[in-house]
């Protein structure tokens, strides 16, 4: 049995994402045609809201990749899968990666290194909705962070447990009843 305890409401998330959008708009206002890359599936809600709070003189280019390191468990498998990593030529561009969460850091590290290797970006930054910095295995320092969370398992607003709960409008902690 599991239950979900809300930790950030839809309204709190919206307020924080608006702040991040304003900050990104300020930081990118003089940069030529930035590329925003959303990491599926987990970042889909965050990305959709964030880009609507980014207001720049020039339009952004939006791309998607699909990466995963979790199977259906709540522990990182340590192996990164890239079922969809089909990007156009974005060499020497300003790239902003939008991820749901950095946990061990393996997924973000893998993808940031891949982008550096393939495209020598003019700049490369990382925006995450959640930073779970208690479990880092690889050093990753996101440039934009929505909220920092402890060592709990989060579902909702794009985050899943075994492909469930992504559609919830809030962020909640998954509590397994009968466990500690
Ligand atoms: P990392 O490679 O260990 O940093 O893990 C990153 C990926 O693990 C994220 O993109 C998520 O898909 C998943 N993940 C890590 N923590 C959670 C969580 O609390 N809830 C849901 N997914 C998570
Ligand atoms: Mg993910």
Image (cartoon, helix red, strand yellow):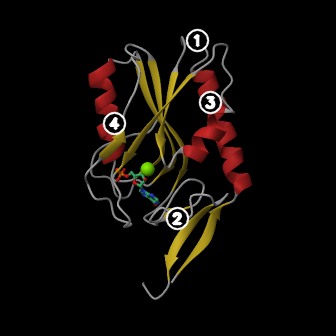
Q: Position of residue 71 (x, y in %)?
A: 35, 61
Please give the name of the residue rendered at 33% of the width and 19% of the height, measured from the top-left corner.
Answer: 119
- The correct choice, above or below, for 18 with respect to 122 in the image is below
Q: Nearer the viewer, residue 63 or 29?
A: 63
Marks 1 & 2, CB-CB < 8 Å contact = no
Considering only order in the chain, which callout, 1 or 4, is on the residue closer to the N terminus?
1
**Residue located beneath label 3 in the image:** 23
Quarter of image, res 57: top right
- Crowd class of label 2 (few under 14; some 14 to 19; many from 20; radius 10 Å): few
Q: CA distance from mark 3 to mark 1?
A: 13 Å
**Residue located beneath label 4 in the image:** 111
Considering only order in the chain, which callout, 3 or 2, is on the residue closer to the N terminus?
3
Please give the name of the residue rendered at 34% of the width and 45% of the height, measured from the top-left corner.
Answer: 107
**Residue located beneath label 2 in the image:** 164
**Residue located beneath label 1 in the image:** 30
Considering only order in the chain, which callout, 4 or 2, is on the residue closer to the N terminus?
4
């Amino acid at each position: 049995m599991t239950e979900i305890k809300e930790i950030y409401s839809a309204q709190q998330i919206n307020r924080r994402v608006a702040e991040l959008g304003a900050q990104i708009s300020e930081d990118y206002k003089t940069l030529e045609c930035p590329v925003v890359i959303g990491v599926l599936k987990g970042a889909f809600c965050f990305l959709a809201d964030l880009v609507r709070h980014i207001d720049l003189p020039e339009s952004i280019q939006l791309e998607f990749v699909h990466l995963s390191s979790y199977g259906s468990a709540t522990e990182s498998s340590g192996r990164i899968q890239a079922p969809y990593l089909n990007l156009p030529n974005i060499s020497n561009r300003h790239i902003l990666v939008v991820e749901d969460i950095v946990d061990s850091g393996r997924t973000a590290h893998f993808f940031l290194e891949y982008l550096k290797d393939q495209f020598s970006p003019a700049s490369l930054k990382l925006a995450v909705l959640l930073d779970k910095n208690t479990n880092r295995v690889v050093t990753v320092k996101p440039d934009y962070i929505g909220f920092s969370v402890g060592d709990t398992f989060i579902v909702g607003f794009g985050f899943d447990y075994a492909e469930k709960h992504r559609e919830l409008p809030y962020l909640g902690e998954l509590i397994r009843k009968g466990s500690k």
